Image (cartoon, rainbow, N blue to C red):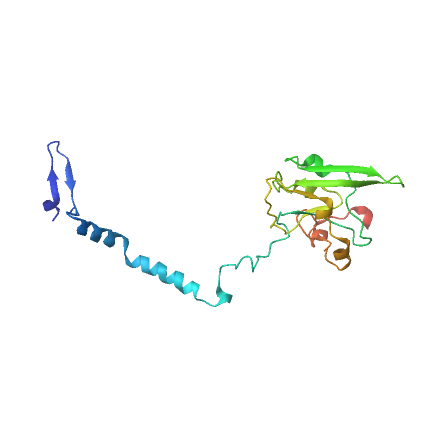
């Protein structure tokens, strides 16, 4: 059957022509339609249309910004500075470990001494334009003072955006209303952390 499509040239090569070349523009148009419009195309369009008209509870698309997906507590987003639940004081003791371990060199901290001789953090800033959100600062903090919260919408018209301590620290008014959870955000202890801690013999 293929013999009628065989063409032998002078070099001895055999070419099989299974489809005739179009001779005019109409035949070219018909060939394009034949190759592009196939039953599989309408199957895909039907699936898209079926999912689009489904009820909202079966919709797989999040209607952003009206709806936002819940993030895990281990999600590394914008930093937060925590307070002590007992007194409301700042957890940060000004040890500077977060500033030293920062691989992006974006954390700056200034400490001072008060009238009682205790060190406190006078200035604290993070350059979010340089931060890579690696989470090292939250992991190294001995007081669980800095964590990564769930705030990821932090757009700005400037190339580099700075956040000061007042911006990241929980406002005292919201803190008194219970706006801060004890263990929340990347870098803090999980609620099941006590189960993985081994007791020493001195505790018995």
Q: Nearer the viewer, residue 192 or 66?
A: 66
Q: Nearer the viewer, residue 22 or 137?
A: 22
Name the spot of residue 94 as percent of width and height, x first: 78, 40
Question: Residue reaching furthest bottom?
Answer: 55
Classify residue 92 by image quadrant: top right
Classify residue 53 by image quadrant: bottom left
Name the spot of residue 91 as percent of width and height, x first: 77, 47
In screen coordinates, is 23 left or right of 71? left
Name the spot of residue 177 as percent of width and height, x first: 76, 60
Residue at image point 12% right, 45% down:
5
What is the tally of numbered marks visible in this picture? 0
Name the spot of residue 185 as percent of width and height, x first: 67, 50
Q: Nearer the viewer, residue 160 or 105?
A: 160
In screen coordinates, is 186 left or right of 6? right
Image vertical order of residue 61 relative to residue 112, above or below: below
Question: Residue reaching furthest front?
Answer: 157
Residue at image point 36% right, 58% down:
44
Q: Nearer the viewer, residue 53 or 144?
A: 53
Image vertical order of residue 79 relative to residue 99, above or below: below
In screen coordinates, is 5 left or right of 152? left
Classify residue 178 by image quadrant: bottom right
Image vertical order of residue 134 relative to residue 179, above or below: above
Question: Residue reaching furthest right?
Answer: 116
In screen coordinates, is 62 left or right of 103? left
């Amino acid at each position: 059957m293929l013999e009628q499509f065989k063409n032998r040239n002078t070099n001895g090569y055999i070419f099989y022509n299974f489809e005739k070349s179009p001779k005019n523009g109409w035949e070219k148009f018909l060939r394009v339609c034949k190759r592009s419009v196939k039953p599989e195309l309408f199957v895909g369009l039907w699936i898209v249309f079926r999912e689009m008209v489904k009820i909202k509870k079966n919709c797989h698309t999040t209607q952003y910004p009206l709806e936002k997906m819940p993030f895990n507590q281990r999600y590394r987003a914008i930093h937060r500075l925590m307070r002590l639940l007992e007194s409301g004081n700042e957890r940060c003791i000004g040890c500077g470990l977060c500033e030293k371990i920062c691989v992006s060199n974006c954390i700056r901290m200034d400490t001072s001494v008060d009238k009682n001789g205790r060190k406190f953090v006078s200035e604290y800033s993070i350059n979010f334009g340089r931060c890579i959100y690696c989470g090292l600062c939250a992991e190294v903090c001995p007081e669980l003072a800095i964590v990564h919260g769930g705030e990821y919408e932090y757009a700005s018209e400037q190339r580099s955006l700075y956040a000061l301590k007042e911006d990241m620290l929980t406002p005292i008014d919201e803190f008194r209303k219970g706006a801060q959870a004890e263990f929340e955000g990347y870098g803090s202890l999980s609620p099941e952390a006590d189960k993985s801690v081994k007791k020493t013999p001195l505790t018995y």
